[in-house]
Protein backbone atom coordinates (compact mmCIF):
# COMPACT_ATOMS: atom_id res chain seq x y z
CA UNK A 1 0.00 0.00 0.00
CA UNK A 2 1.25 3.48 -0.84
CA UNK A 3 1.97 5.75 2.10
CA UNK A 4 1.57 9.44 2.89
CA UNK A 5 3.22 11.24 5.78
CA UNK A 6 1.17 13.73 7.81
CA UNK A 7 3.44 16.20 9.59
CA UNK A 8 2.26 18.81 12.07
CA UNK A 9 4.50 21.46 13.57
CA UNK A 10 4.62 23.45 16.80
CA UNK A 11 1.54 23.99 18.98
CA UNK A 12 -0.70 21.84 16.80
CA UNK A 13 -0.75 19.28 19.63
CA UNK A 14 -2.89 21.95 21.36
CA UNK A 15 -5.64 21.95 18.71
CA UNK A 16 -9.07 22.00 20.30
CA UNK A 17 -7.84 24.01 23.31
CA UNK A 18 -5.70 26.54 21.50
CA UNK A 19 -7.38 29.77 20.31
CA UNK A 20 -10.57 27.95 19.23
CA UNK A 21 -11.92 31.07 17.53
CA UNK A 22 -9.02 30.75 15.05
CA UNK A 23 -8.31 27.02 14.90
CA UNK A 24 -11.69 25.52 15.85
CA UNK A 25 -12.57 22.92 18.47
CA UNK A 26 -11.34 19.78 16.72
CA UNK A 27 -8.26 18.11 18.13
CA UNK A 28 -5.11 16.80 16.46
CA UNK A 29 -6.55 13.31 16.92
CA UNK A 30 -9.56 14.39 14.84
CA UNK A 31 -7.21 15.70 12.12
CA UNK A 32 -5.27 12.43 12.05
CA UNK A 33 -8.52 10.42 11.83
CA UNK A 34 -9.81 12.61 8.98
CA UNK A 35 -6.61 12.23 6.95
CA UNK A 36 -6.34 8.49 7.59
CA UNK A 37 -9.98 7.85 6.61
CA UNK A 38 -9.70 10.00 3.47
CA UNK A 39 -6.47 8.34 2.37
CA UNK A 40 -7.63 4.82 3.24
CA UNK A 41 -10.65 5.15 0.91
CA UNK A 42 -8.22 5.84 -1.93
CA UNK A 43 -5.91 2.96 -1.03
CA UNK A 44 -3.25 4.89 0.90
CA UNK A 45 -2.02 4.51 4.45
CA UNK A 46 -0.85 7.45 6.56
CA UNK A 47 1.96 7.79 9.07
CA UNK A 48 1.45 10.80 11.32
CA UNK A 49 3.92 12.78 13.38
CA UNK A 50 3.72 16.02 15.36
CA UNK A 51 6.63 17.90 16.86
CA UNK A 52 7.29 21.24 18.49
CA UNK A 53 10.95 21.01 17.39
CA UNK A 54 12.28 22.17 14.05
CA UNK A 55 15.09 19.60 13.82
CA UNK A 56 12.69 16.71 14.45
CA UNK A 57 10.59 17.90 11.52
CA UNK A 58 13.72 18.12 9.33
CA UNK A 59 14.54 14.50 10.29
CA UNK A 60 11.04 13.32 9.37
CA UNK A 61 11.13 15.08 6.00
CA UNK A 62 14.45 13.45 5.18
CA UNK A 63 13.18 10.02 6.26
CA UNK A 64 9.97 10.32 4.23
CA UNK A 65 11.69 10.19 0.88
CA UNK A 66 12.46 6.48 1.24
CA UNK A 67 9.10 5.30 2.53
CA UNK A 68 6.34 7.62 1.32
CA UNK A 69 4.80 9.01 -1.84
CA UNK A 70 4.13 12.50 -0.44
CA UNK A 71 3.97 14.70 2.67
CA UNK A 72 1.01 16.71 4.00
CA UNK A 73 2.59 19.35 6.17
CA UNK A 74 1.29 22.03 8.50
CA UNK A 75 4.57 23.65 9.56
CA UNK A 76 2.63 26.09 11.82
CA UNK A 77 4.84 29.00 12.97
CA UNK A 78 7.94 27.57 11.25
CA UNK A 79 6.21 28.36 7.94
CA UNK A 80 7.21 31.96 8.37
CA UNK A 81 10.78 31.50 9.60
CA UNK A 82 12.42 28.22 8.70
CA UNK A 83 15.18 28.04 6.11
CA UNK A 84 16.07 24.60 7.55
CA UNK A 85 12.62 23.19 6.70
CA UNK A 86 12.71 24.81 3.27
CA UNK A 87 16.10 23.22 2.56
CA UNK A 88 14.82 19.83 3.78
CA UNK A 89 11.83 20.02 1.42
CA UNK A 90 14.11 21.08 -1.46
CA UNK A 91 16.39 18.14 -0.76
CA UNK A 92 13.77 15.41 -1.34
CA UNK A 93 12.02 14.40 -4.53
CA UNK A 94 8.52 13.62 -3.28
CA UNK A 95 5.77 16.30 -3.25
CA UNK A 96 4.95 18.31 -0.14
CA UNK A 97 1.63 20.15 0.30
CA UNK A 98 1.58 22.97 2.85
CA UNK A 99 -1.65 23.17 4.90
CA UNK A 100 -2.92 25.95 7.15
CA UNK A 101 -6.11 25.72 9.14
CA UNK A 102 -6.66 29.47 9.34
CA UNK A 103 -6.61 31.95 6.47
CA UNK A 104 -3.13 33.30 7.18
CA UNK A 105 -3.66 36.10 4.64
CA UNK A 106 -6.43 37.61 6.78
CA UNK A 107 -4.19 37.63 9.86
CA UNK A 108 -1.06 39.51 10.98
CA UNK A 109 1.29 40.50 8.16
CA UNK A 110 4.09 38.26 9.51
CA UNK A 111 1.85 35.28 8.65
CA UNK A 112 1.41 36.34 5.02
CA UNK A 113 4.81 35.10 3.93
CA UNK A 114 5.73 31.44 3.69
CA UNK A 115 9.39 30.42 3.50
CA UNK A 116 8.23 27.01 2.33
CA UNK A 117 5.53 27.62 -0.29
CA UNK A 118 8.01 28.19 -3.17
CA UNK A 119 9.41 24.67 -2.71
CA UNK A 120 6.06 22.94 -2.06
CA UNK A 121 3.85 21.35 -4.70
CA UNK A 122 0.87 23.35 -3.41
CA UNK A 123 -0.70 25.14 -0.48
CA UNK A 124 -4.16 24.91 1.12
CA UNK A 125 -5.15 27.73 3.43
CA UNK A 126 -8.25 28.83 5.30
CA UNK A 127 -10.60 25.83 5.11
CA UNK A 128 -10.32 24.87 8.77
CA UNK A 129 -9.37 21.27 9.41
CA UNK A 130 -11.18 20.28 6.21
CA UNK A 131 -8.06 21.67 4.49
CA UNK A 132 -6.26 18.49 5.53
CA UNK A 133 -8.88 16.37 3.71
CA UNK A 134 -8.59 18.57 0.62
CA UNK A 135 -4.80 18.32 0.75
CA UNK A 136 -5.01 14.52 1.04
CA UNK A 137 -7.24 14.28 -2.04
CA UNK A 138 -5.09 16.77 -3.97
CA UNK A 139 -1.93 14.90 -3.08
CA UNK A 140 -3.33 11.54 -4.18
CA UNK A 141 -4.58 13.02 -7.48
CA UNK A 142 -1.14 14.48 -8.06
CA UNK A 143 0.69 11.23 -7.30
CA UNK A 144 -1.67 9.17 -9.46
CA UNK A 145 -1.57 11.61 -12.39
CA UNK A 146 2.19 11.85 -12.34
CA UNK A 147 2.44 8.07 -12.22
CA UNK A 148 0.40 7.95 -15.44
CA UNK A 149 2.67 10.35 -17.38
C1 LIG B 1 -0.83 27.42 12.47
C2 LIG B 1 0.02 28.11 13.28
O1 LIG B 1 0.42 27.59 14.44
C3 LIG B 1 0.46 29.47 12.95
O2 LIG B 1 1.75 29.75 13.47
C4 LIG B 1 0.43 29.75 11.46
C5 LIG B 1 -1.17 27.88 11.12
C6 LIG B 1 -0.92 29.35 10.89
C7 LIG B 1 -2.54 27.38 10.68
O3 LIG B 1 -3.42 28.18 10.35
O4 LIG B 1 -2.73 26.16 10.66
O5 LIG B 1 0.68 31.11 11.24
Image (cartoon, rainbow, N blue to C red):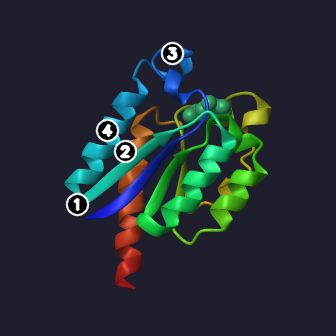
Q: If you read the primary sequence from the N terminus, does the residue marked by circle 1 or circle 4 appear first?
A: 4
Residue 27 seen in the figure: yes
Residue at image coords 46%, 32%: 128
Where in the image, quadrant-wise, is ligand 1 located?
top right
Residue 87 occupies which quadrant of the picture?
bottom right
Question: Would the CB of label 1 be found within 8 Å of ligand 1?
Answer: no
Q: Secondary structure at mark 4?
A: helix
Q: Are marks 2 and 4 in contact (CB under 8 Å)?
A: yes
CA distance for labels 3 and 1:
33 Å
Query: Label 2 belongs to which residue?
Result: 133
Task: Note whether 122 is above or below 25 in the view shown.
Answer: below
Q: If you read the primary sequence from the N terminus, does the residue marked by circle 2 or circle 4 appear first?
A: 4
- Estimate the x, y position of residue 16 in percent, counting from the top left: 45, 18
Q: Secondary structure at mark 2?
A: helix
CA distance for labels 4 and 3:
18 Å
Left or right: where does residue 120 sit relative to residue 80? left
Question: Would the CB of label 2 be found within 8 Å of ligand 1?
Answer: no
Badge 3 density bin: few <14, some 14–19, many ≥20, Cα 10 Å: few
Query: Label 4 belongs to which residue?
Result: 34
Residue 69 seen in the figure: no
Task: Note whether 79 is above or below 12 in the view shown.
Answer: below
CA distance for labels 2 and 4:
7 Å
Query: Label 1 belongs to which residue?
Result: 43
CA distance for labels 1 and 4:
14 Å
Q: Which mark is residue 20?
A: 3
Q: Are marks 3 and 1 in contact (CB under 8 Å)?
A: no
Q: If you read the primary sequence from the N terminus, does the residue marked by circle 3 or circle 2 appear first?
A: 3
Residue at image coords 66%, 68%: 91
Q: Which label lies toward us, 2 or 4? A: 4
Task: Note whether 28 is above or below 73 in the view shown.
Answer: above
Q: If you read the primary sequence from the N terminus, does the residue marked by circle 4 or circle 3 appear first?
A: 3
Amino acid sequence: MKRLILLNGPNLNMLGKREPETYGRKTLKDVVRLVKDTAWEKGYEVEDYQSNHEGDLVDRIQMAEDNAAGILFNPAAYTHTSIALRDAISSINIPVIEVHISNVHQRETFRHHSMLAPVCAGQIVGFGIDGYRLATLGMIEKIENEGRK
